[in-house]
Amino acid sequence: MYNILTLNKIAKVGTNRLGDNYACSDSVANPDAVLVRSAAMHDMEMPETLLAIARAGAGVNNIPVAKCAEEGIVVFNTPGANANAVKELVIAGLLMSSRKVLAGIEWAKTLKGNGDAVGKMVEKGKSQFVGPEIKGKKLGVIGLGAIGILVANAAADLGMEVLGYDPYISVDAAWKLSHNVKHAQTVDQIYAECDYITVHVPLNDSTREGINASTIAKMKDGVRILNFSRDGLVNSADILAGVKSGKIACYVTDFATDDILCEENIIVMPHLGASTPESEDNCAVMAADQIKDYLENGNITNSVNYPALSMARSGDIRFCVMHKNAPKMLTQILDCITSNGANVEGMENKSKGEYAYTVVDATGADQAVKASIEAIEGVIRVRVI
């Protein structure tokens, strides 16, 4: 029986996939794994039983990823599961940044009570909400991951000229990109040429406050900026200054901060990006499947702190070893398994930064081998399945 602790409400379509051999609730003791959405885990004491954490979403800023790696706890996320939901909201934001739809709706409400005069009042006052069409305009997409690609393709289908920039784009991602999306050689090219800019990169030390006074100065006058990724990607004070000066025609974001609320030409949404039933279901299913495969088979898919490794089962026992990415580790692990006459039926070893993961299937191995593997310097955790 596996114990799964839920720190947020997780869609049942996901938790139901775990099966009868799982106890899953927000109160289980000694959890083998955690399913989480937005709950902060940085101050949480990790129980010794904890093997994995699955975030039902893409970002993992609420999880102490490095600390988990040190303790042999695999952290999963669910890239792409909520991509369509975010893409749809970005396209809505793109339209709202141009057409002053929200301001027009709010103004129309003020006409209540004027009876038959409302029609004439509308025709007289609507000119204040004029805004440009997006067709034929140039959109810069910074970051071509699961969401960025969908946004770029959708914008191209709407008739925009799209420039995409991502120095780390994967081969698989590149295959999904529309041939109508042009490749920007540098991010400065996007700043200089684009009428609209949307940011879809993770938040880390290299991207934090990447949109700031210096980069805004490189942009076209009247640029419209969209941020549906992370609030920390922009310097909000510099954004506000840019809007007030007219350099930025509109800023649209899914992240509310006090300084930008109720400001003219700034549209703030309450983090609605993945708030669809379809997205929550998709994330829950992916997170549950990844947890289940790791607990039962030791396979890792979509981890942010350990390498991806999946291997079909062979032999009668499986050793899963989390260890430092150091020389001679594999030789020592295999020596421990084969020294008592066991036969290795299959083996995979992958690394990710300073950490590595080795899976060995063997026949005729004694489970006591686990202790000898654990004694190797640099080994973090050993599981026997």
Image (cartoon, grey):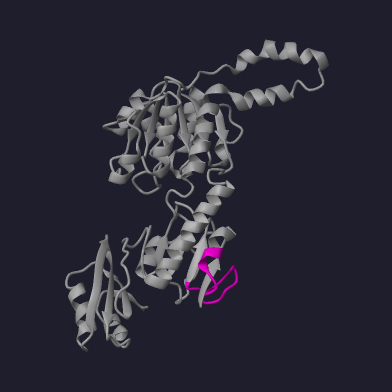
Which is more toward the observer, 219 or 139?
139
Q: Where is residue 258 in the image (x, y as percent from the top left)?
A: 58, 40
288 displayed left or right of 108 = left
Q: Position of residue 12 (x, y in %)?
A: 59, 60
Quadrant position of residue 337: bottom left
Q: What stretch is highlighted in magenta?
A: 16-32
Tell me what residue is drawn at x 46 percent, y 76 percent. Answer: 49
Quadrant position of residue 194: top left
Tell me what residue is drawn at x 58 percent, y 30 percent. Answer: 263
Q: Position of residue 362 (x, y in %)?
A: 27, 79
- The answer to whether residue 55 of the structure is visible from this angle is no
Quadrant position of residue 336: bottom left
- Determine whether 23 is above or below 209 in the image: below
Q: Is residue 323 magenta?
A: no
Which is more toward the observer, 346 or 323?
346
Tell me what residue is drawn at x 32 percent, y 64 percent. Answer: 310
